[in-house]
Image (cartoon, rainbow, N blue to C red):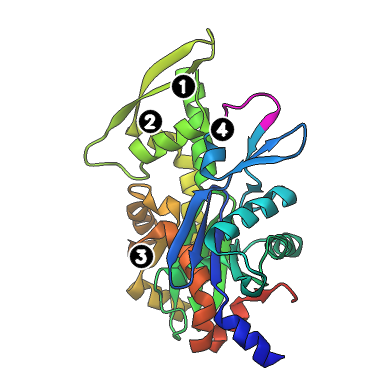
Amino acid sequence: MRRVQDIFGRFTRNLGIDLGTANTLVHVHGKGILVREPSVVAVDSKTGQILSVGANAKQMLGRTPGHIKAVRPLKDGVIADFEQTEAMLRYFIDRSTRRQWWTAPQVVVGIPSGVTEVERRAVLDATRKAGARDAFVVEEPMAAAIGAGLRVEEPCGCMVVDIGGGTTEVAVISLAGIVTSQSVRIAGEKIDEAIVSFVRRYHGMLIGDRTAEEIKLTVGSAFPLVEEVSMQIRGRDLISGLPKQTTLSSVEVREAISEPIAQIVEAVKQALERTPPELAADIMDSGICLAGGGALLRGLDELIHRATEMPVFIADDPLTCVAMGCGKILDEVERVPALRHALIHANS
């Protein structure tokens, strides 16, 4: 039986999936990132039929007739709708590998470190039902550290801060294990919501989530810029109900997002406070690694550096770190057996 499994394993593709609140990325062994799409599903509420997944479904957000809903099946990094998540996973797995019964993939999915047993089991069950031969989960900060190229197996401390769409994961890792971690459900979505709220309150204008994300990417910053910038935004006037245009500056956006950013910085400080002194000294040498889409917010590295007095650097490709780490970990387990403890199997 073992020999048969080994033979099948030669033809099986290992998939690493970053199942994010905002976006889903799929890493295929030997091919890199093959899928990078929004975690959105369009559903016909009359029939329950799923009409579209990913980028096409995101285009429908806020623009659909009454009977079609474009929704995000994950909330704060965990499954909010099991059936829609399963359908989304099946779509992404199909896109990443040819579906043959003898080549069903082994899949590793990254999950927030603060999830409950029920939430973890939901991810494993959805992955198996979506077509995985074997399903595993790994905590996102461990996957992000591996994907960023940190030497997680060495007897010295490294620290990673993974800022995604729904959660921010902070972890100190040594000897292929998480020594201390902090997970807060404050990340990209909360930053977008803060921008929407600010524009509504101070400009009397209603904007959508897509516009808020564009504002964040264009003029958002966590630390004062050398040259402050501004942009024109469009929305709906709250009083007249008519379309409205106004100018928003980077100073205003920084004020708008100051509260969620402060909570992220506080999570980093709390993790450092619980870190053993020897590992804290190692981090002082190696620095804090920022990963995830939130790492691209201008000035965030400088803000964390000022708050912690630790060196801070951004991963080479922060958006793909978790997916890359999930894809690599099955190969790394052969080289670093201690990593087996980081993987949780569907049958566990």
Where does label 1 land, which residue? 202
Of the residues under marks 3 and 4, which one precedes in the sequence?
Answer: 4
What kind of element bears circle 3? loop
Q: Residues within 10 Å of mark 2 (few under 14, many from 20)?
A: some
Who comes first in sequence, dot 1 or dot 3? 1
Q: Quadrant of residue 156?
A: bottom left
User: What is the secondary structure assignment of the residue under circle 2?
Assistant: helix
At label 3, the amino acid type is: Met
Quarter of the image for residue 304 reads: bottom left
Taking depth in this image into account, of 70 and 239 the one nearest to the observer is 70
Mark positioned earlier in the residue sequence (2 or 3): 2
Label 3 belongs to which residue?
Answer: 310
Q: Does 205 sit above or below residue 194?
A: above
Residue under label 2: 252
Q: Are marks 1 and 2 in contact (CB under 8 Å)?
A: yes
Q: Amino acid at mark 1?
A: Tyr
Residue bearing the label numbered 4: 60
Residue closest to the eye, 73 or 204: 73
Q: Please name which of the two marks, 2 or 4, marks the residue nearer to the observer.
A: 4
Q: Earlier in the sequence, mark 1 or mark 2?
A: 1
Residue 208 in the image: state x and y as whole percent. 52, 29
Left or right of 276? Residue 311 is left
Task: Give the secondary structure at mark 1.
Answer: helix
Q: CA distance from mark 3 to mark 4?
A: 43 Å
